Every structure is written in C-alpha cells, then in structure tokens.
Amino acid sequence: MASQSAVFGRRREPHTVIIARGDEIRHFTVRPWMAALAGSAVAAVTLGYFTATSYLVFRDDLIGAAIARQARMQHAYEDRISALRTQVDRITSRQLLDQRLMETKVTELLARQSKLSERHGRLGPLLERAGSEADRTQAAAPEKRGDEQAQLSPPQAPALAHAAHPAGDPFALWSTRAGNDPGESPADRADKLFVAINQSLRTIESEQIDKITSLADNAYETAEQISDAIEQAGLPVDLDFSNEAMGGPFLAVPRPHVFDTKVKELDQALDKLERAKEQARQLPIGNPAAGRSISSTFGVRKDPILGMPAMHSGMDFRAPSGFPARATAPGTVTWAGWNGGYGRMVEIDHGNGLSTRFAHLSRIEVKEGQKVEAGDVLGQVGSSGRSTGPHLHYEVRKDGEAVDPLRFIKLGKRLSQLL
C-alpha cells in the first residue's frame, strides 16, 4: 500500500496506476514530482514540436525572401556592371572617335603642308627669275630675295609628328610651351594645336599670295617704266602680247584657284618684264667711251677744218689714242675698215633699223660679220680720216638717217637702274 504524505497538515493519497494484462496485474505509484516531471517533459516536447512545425512552415518563406533579396542584389550588381560597361564602351568609342578625328585633322594638315611644299616647288623658278631681275636693279636684292624665299617656304610643323601618334599625351610639350592649362584633356589641347597650325598655314598661304602679287606688280611697274622711257625717247617699243594668229575650239575650264591665278599672273609679268628688258638691251643705249668728256655734240656746228657751218651727224668724245671704243648694244659688224673722211670705221647693225658707227679709230679689232655684245671692244681711239686730233666720233642711225646719240645715252642712264 502506498505511503501517505502530509501537505499542510493534511493527508494526500498518492496516485496508483494499475495495469492488468490477463492474469498479470501491475501497478505503479505516481508521485507528484514524477507527474510534474512528466508534464514538463510533455510540455517541452509539445513546445519543441510546435516550434519545429512553425520553423518548417515559415522556412520556405524565409528562404524565398532571402533568395529574392539575393536576386535583387544580383540584379542590382548586374545593372551596375552593365552601366559601367556601357560607360566604358562610350568612353572607348569617344576615344576612338577622337583618335579618328585627330588622324583626319593630321591628314588634312599634312595634305596642306604637302600642298604648300608643292607650291614652293612651283614658286622656286619664279623666285629665281624675280630674284635675278632684282639683282640687276637693287644692290640689296640677295637679302631681299632670301627674305622672300623664307617667307614663301613651306611650314615645318614638328607637332604633326606627335599628332600622328595620339596615344598618351603627345601635346604636353606644346601645352607647356604654349602656356595651356595642364588640366585640359589631350583632345582639347589637340584641338587648340590644330587651330594654331591651321592659322599658321593660312597665314603662310596669305603671305605667299601677297608676295606673289607684290612681285607681279613690281614686274609690271618696271616693265611699264622701261616702256615709258623708250617711248619718251621716241623709239618703238612693243611689249603687249599679241592676240593675233590664235584660235582653236572653246574648252571651258573650272575657275582656277587664287594661288594658281596669281602664279600665272606673276609668270606673265616676268615674261613682260624680260621682254621689255630684252628690247631695251637691243637698243644702242650704252656709252662708247665711258668716263670721257664730249667735245662736240650732234647737230649744226662750225666745221673744225673749213670754219663753215656744217651738219655734225654724231657726237665726239675727247679721248687719247689707244683708248678702247666699246659697242653700245649687241649686233653684227657690217663694216670694219677705211671709209673716207671717217677714217678707220666700224659699223654695227643692231636690228630694227638701228645701227651705230665708230670713226677715226687708230686700230680696228673686229671684222665684218662678227657678232658683238654690248661692251665689247671694237677698236682703239685715234685720229684717222678727217680729224684734227685723237677723239671718237660716234653715230646712231635709224633707217640710215643720223639721229642724236645723246638721246640714247640719256635713255641708257635712265634704264641702268631698271635693267
């Protein structure tokens, strides 16, 4: 029989569990503390069961939320990466575009520089012609011609060599020299450099055209001065290019470039100037006895032998025997020998109806048919023929008639600065 226990002075009966199985009967006495322990265990198991059940129920939601959050983060990262790739592609495309633009600009600059070099090659012969003409008229022509060639020379742009390789920062040196902002991008500095080079090339082109125009104007002006001087001397001159004996089908051509037009104009001006000088040099405008005084002029005078008025067909230069008599223009010797009162005489045909005579020579040093140039020695001064003493008798004839030689000599002095 189960033992009795007292609670607060009262007697409490223990709980007895009887288990019968056939003839076998078993019983257990359940004490309070055992019941409390069993209840606690059942409560703990029940609580654990409900907790596990709740976890299993909400786990899928938690996992789904975590997966969704992870997916959102992944999408965000992918969007960011895509944006960065787009930005990189945009920057790369911009760099490629800048590089292509830079290469295009460099190509254009090199083409313009090549064109200027080609122009310089075309200008070379013209400058030589203009310089050779200037050498005859100005003592300072070599320096001037050197300045002209320096101004017309093609530009040397060392920055182009850097610009042709856009990698890195090829314009740093130029930027430092030009005082640009170091914070500027290479593309900005390249644009500024291209603008500066283009401006330089345009300036050189303008200087070339201006210099060509100036040379052409000077050539035309000099030719006109020669023409006017010859006309004022009463001599024929023909400097205009004839439009006769010309023809052919009309073939229209595009309007030429300003540079080509100016070059053609300069070439025509130099041709006209050369033609004017050539015509002037064919005239007997030299002095046959340079540095000697004139003892008798052209025209009516008192004959030195008879003392009567007589026509003097030339002019006399006072000179000692043996003094050289020089040709005053190129021509051909048509007489070289004794000619009556002229004594020993040389006559030269200069063309266009002009001829000169050198009389009273003591010695003749040319022969008939010989070609002579201005300044060549024809003979020596003497007193042969009808003469009162050593001197040079000089005549200029136009179509066989004697004209005043002094007019030609004065013309020669006027043209000496132009020829």
Image (tube, grey):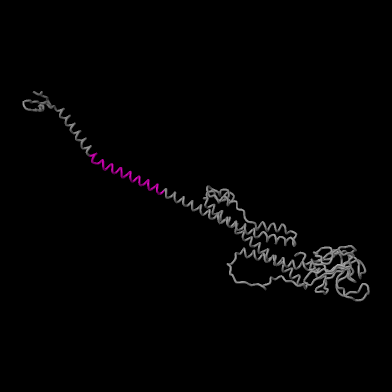
Which segment did they paint magenta?
54-83
Which residue is nearer to you in this view: 12 or 70? 70
Residue 8 visible somewhere in the drawing: no
Seen as rendered, the residue at the extreme right is 306
Question: Could you tell whether 160 is left or right of 32 in the image?
Answer: right
Residue 280 visible somewhere in the drawing: yes
Seen as rendered, the residue at the extreme front is 369
Which residue is nearer to you in this view: 398 or 21? 398
Question: Could you tell whether 65 is left or right of 288 in the image?
Answer: left
Up the image or down, 69 lies above or below 339; here it is above
- Number of numbered markers: 0
Instruction: Tell me, yes or no, whether the highlighted magenta stretch contains residue 71.
Output: yes
Tell me what residue is drawn at x 31 percent, y 43 percent.
67
Residue 386 place in picture, x, y as percent = 91, 70
Seen as rendered, the residue at the extreme bottom is 309
Question: Could you tell whether 340 is left or right of 44 in the image?
Answer: right
Q: Quadrant of residue 399?
A: bottom right
Instruction: Tell me, yes or no, whether the highlighted magenta stretch contains residue 182.
Output: no
Q: Quadrant of residue 268?
A: bottom right
Quarter of the image with the N terminus is top left
Quarter of the image with the C terminus is bottom right
Up the image or down, 64 lies above or below 335; here it is above
Residue 90 place in picture, x, y as percent = 45, 51
Seen as rendered, the residue at the extreme left is 23
Residue 272 place in picture, x, y as percent = 70, 67
Question: Could you tell whether 74 is left or right of 307 in the image?
Answer: left
Up the image or down, 295 lies above or below 157; here it is below
